[in-house]
Image: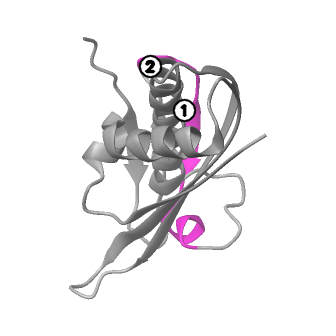
Amino acid sequence: MPTRIARTAWNGNLQEGSGQVELSSSKVGTFEVSFPKRTADDAGGTTSPEELIAAAHSSCFAMQLSALIAEAGGIPQSLEVTAKVSLGPDPAGGFQLTGIALEVHGEVEGLDAAGFEAAAQQAKQSCPVSKALTGVQITLAASMD
């Protein structure tokens, strides 16, 4: 299996510095990062580790769920997955991820709502990114047409 690579170049201290994160393996882009914008309500055109984790988690979950729906005898027509990753203070000092809220809405043939919910819960537990993030509380809301 492949190894994927990202690289960050950072200049300056935490509060006044900034950097660029490069998605090196795919070469799809380089994105600005900044700690003040990371902790602000408005990201102001920069990304953050939390947004990148949200992207990884939503895409991983969607792939895993599509496989599990098929295993259960369903046909996934469309899945829309949102991952909301929250950052907050760590009681031990610094910051920590305080939670991940996954939301999925699906259009699926051949499964009822209970079957879809079961597949979604299984995907939440078994997608590789969920497994990597076991130290963070992950919630799930699943609905289908």
Q: Which mark is residue 62?
A: 1
Q: Is residue 71 left or right of residue 37?
A: left
The quadrant of the rendering that contains the C terminus is top right
Q: Which residues are magenta?
A: 25-39
Q: CA distance from mark 1 to mark 2?
A: 14 Å
Does 95 appear in magenta? no
Residue sticking out furthest to the right: 145
Residue 56 visible in the picture: no
Q: Please state the horizontal and vertical placement of residue 69, each as a whole percent of the image.
A: 52, 26
Residue sticking out furthest to the top: 1
Type of the residue with mark 2 = Glu
Residue sticking out furthest to the bottom: 91
Q: Is residue 82 above or below residue 15?
A: above
Residue matched to label 2: 71
Q: Is residue 8 above or below residue 68?
A: below
* SS at circle 1: helix
The quadrant of the rendering that contains the N terminus is top left
Q: Nearer the viewer, mark 1 or mark 2?
A: 2
Type of the residue with mark 1 = Ala
Residue sticking out furthest to the left: 92
Residue drawn at point x = 43 percent, y = 67 percent? 99
Residue drawn at point x = 34 percent, y = 45 percent? 125
Question: 28 and 16: which one is in front?
Answer: 28
What is the count of numbered marks? 2
Q: Please state the horizontal and vertical placement of residue 48, each as a whole percent of the image.
A: 52, 54
Question: 30 and 11: which one is in front?
Answer: 30
